[in-house]
Amino acid sequence: MKSIACRVIDYLAPQFCIYCDQESYRPEAVCEVCRDALLVNDQACPKCALPGTDGRICPNCLKAEPALKTVTAAYEYDPAIAYLMHRWKYLKDRNLSLTAAKMMLNTEIRIKSADIVLATPLHWRRRLRRGFNQSEDLLLSLSRLQPSLQPTPTKVAQLKRRFATKTQAHASRRERLNNLQGAFTVVGDVRGCSIVLIDDVCTTGATGNAMGRALQDAGASEVHLYCLARTPSP
Ligand SMILES: [Zn+2]
Ligand SMILES: [Zn+2]
């Protein structure tokens, strides 16, 4: 049941669905019909969330054990998600973080409780240019909806990006790994801690694995990554 204040705000500043442009009387910017038409990533590799494996472990994960224990992506990255990401990141529509969080939790995804929950960091220069880190915004919105993700004062750690990495999408596997070697450092004590990482989109899995490796090297017991969407194999 909505409060009177919320109804007044809806009336004065109605939300429009970013896909169909229909007026919606909900705080999200994607209407239920358009949300339900998105490709849910529920037939993915349980290790790296690669879409379309019928739930089986993909050949890459069989070949080399990933540093992340699991990666879970709510949706397949398709043109509809690309459009949402464009508006969110490049047109700087920060309200979309709540929409993305609700979209994630509307699927079967249940984010594990962990000792520490972290957002994928942006390099400071990229963050300065964009003005915000969309993964941090996503974590903030998720933690409002799922209070178990809120930080505990006793366990504090940070993941930092030491240098900006090149775009990963067209790089070979070896180039990706070389690009990311030593890209992340861990600040704080994560020894024996379970970690949940939150990211907007998982493209190649290489960034997630580099973060997982850095956290494991710092003594984390297990690292899980959750994201809004995962790209299919090229
Ligand atoms: Zn719509
Ligand atoms: Zn896999």
Image (spheres, rainbow, N blue to C red):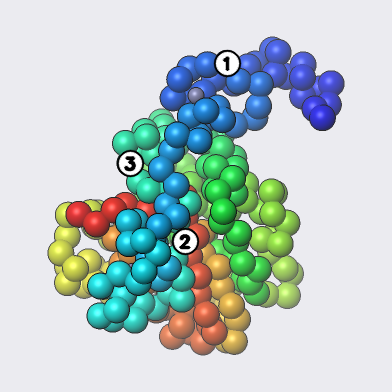
Give the image quarter of residue 7. Answer: top right
Where residue 30 appears, x then y in whole percent?
Answer: 53, 30
Which disc, if any, is residue 72? Answer: 2
Q: Which numbered disc, 1 or 3, marks the residue that appears first in the sequence?
A: 1
Do callouts 1 and 3 mark residues in contact (Cβ within 8 Å)? no
List the residue tagged with mark 1: 23
Where residue 89 appears, x then y in whole percent?
Answer: 41, 39
What amino acid type should be assigned to the residue bearing mark 1? Answer: Glu
What amino acid type should be assigned to the residue bearing mark 2? Answer: Thr
Q: Exactly how many numbered labels are in the figure?
A: 3
- The residue depicted at 30 percent of the width and 69 percent of the height is 58
Of helix, strand and loop, which one carries label 1?
strand
Which disc, if any, is residue 31? Answer: none
Asked if residue 222 can be seen in this view, the reply is yes
Of helix, strand and loop, which one carries label 3?
loop
Viewer-nearest residue: 147 or 45 = 45
Q: What separation in Å lies between label 1 and label 2 (alpha carbons)?
A: 31 Å
Give the image quarter of residue 114. Answer: bottom right
Q: Is residue 154 left or right of residue 77?
A: right
List the residue tagged with mark 3: 78
